[in-house]
């Protein structure tokens, strides 16, 4: 009886060790696959995306910025874009920190990311009608990428004042305009 029990215990132990080894090999393969995929994702820039700006009916005083990946690799839309309202803007629009998504927006080729732009509010000061919007993507560390894309604003120009802000990139237009 003891011989049978010992043999069964050894067989069970061998099976457990083999199962754990197999699980370790599979986990290592999955980790390597994830690392390879992450290495092939690039930062979204003006060179690998098409950027458009449109006026929306609701909410008022808002624009919708849309960035579509035109490249062949997935790209990360980090943080929020740096926006310059007008050619002579001294500083980019502020980022609406309360719109930070839970994860970086990843765009597969052909997919889009969205950012909502509040152009003005009664609480804002000063302001002017601007005809262009400069768009600069951000890198992983929050710095600017090298290239700026200049867009013409709808209707020959849009009024911006000191209350103007932009949301972080979102994976859908509704979230970009919900704040």
Image (cartoon, helix red, strand yellow):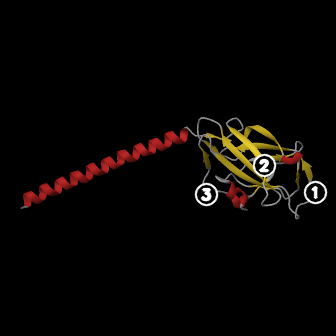
93 horizontally vs 18: left or right: right
* Mark 3 Cα shell of 10 Å, populated few (<14), some (14-19), many (≥20): few
**In which quadrant of the rendered view does residue 118 lie?**
bottom right
Q: Is residue 5 visible?
A: yes
Residue designated by label 3: 102
Position of 14 relative to 45 (above/below): below
Say if mark 3 contacts mark 1, CB within 8 Å: no
Neighbourhood count class around disc 2 (C-alpha, 10 Å): few under 14, some 14–19, many 20 upward: some
Tell me the mark number nearer the camera, choosing from 2 and 1.
2
Q: Secondary structure at mark 2?
A: strand
Query: Which residue: 31% across, 51% down?
Result: 20
Calculate the distance from the C-alpha at mark 3 to the C-alpha at mark 1: 34 Å
Query: To which residue does mark 1 refer?
Result: 126
Residue receiving disc 2 = 54
| Mark positioned earlier in the residue sequence (2 or 1) | 2
The quarter of the picture where the C terminus appears is bottom right
Residue 90 visible in image: no
Per the model, the C-alpha gap separating discs 2 and 1 is 23 Å
Q: Nearer the viewer, residue 165 or 31?
A: 165
């Amino acid at each position: 009886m003891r011989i049978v029990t010992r043999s069964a215990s050894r067989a069970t132990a061998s099976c457990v060790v083999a199962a754990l080894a197999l699980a370790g090999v599979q986990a290592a393969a999955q980790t390597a696959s994830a690392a390879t995929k992450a290495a092939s994702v690039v930062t979204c820039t003006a060179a690998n995306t098409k950027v458009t700006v449109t006026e929306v009916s609701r909410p008022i005083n808002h624009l919708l910025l849309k960035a579509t990946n035109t490249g062949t690799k997935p790209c990360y839309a980090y943080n929020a874009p740096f926006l310059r309202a007008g050619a002579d803007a001294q500083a980019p629009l502020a980022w609406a920190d309360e719109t930070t998504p839970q994860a970086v927006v990843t765009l597969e080729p052909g997919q889009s990311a969205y950012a909502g732009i509040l152009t003005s509010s009664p609480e804002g000061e000063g302001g002017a009608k601007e005809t262009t919007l400069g768009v600069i993507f951000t890198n992983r560390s929050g710095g600017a990428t090298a290239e700026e894309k200049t867009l013409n604003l709808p209707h020959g120009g849009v009024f911006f004042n000191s209350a103007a802000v932009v949301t972080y990139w979102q994976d859908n237009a509704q979230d970009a305009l919900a704040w």
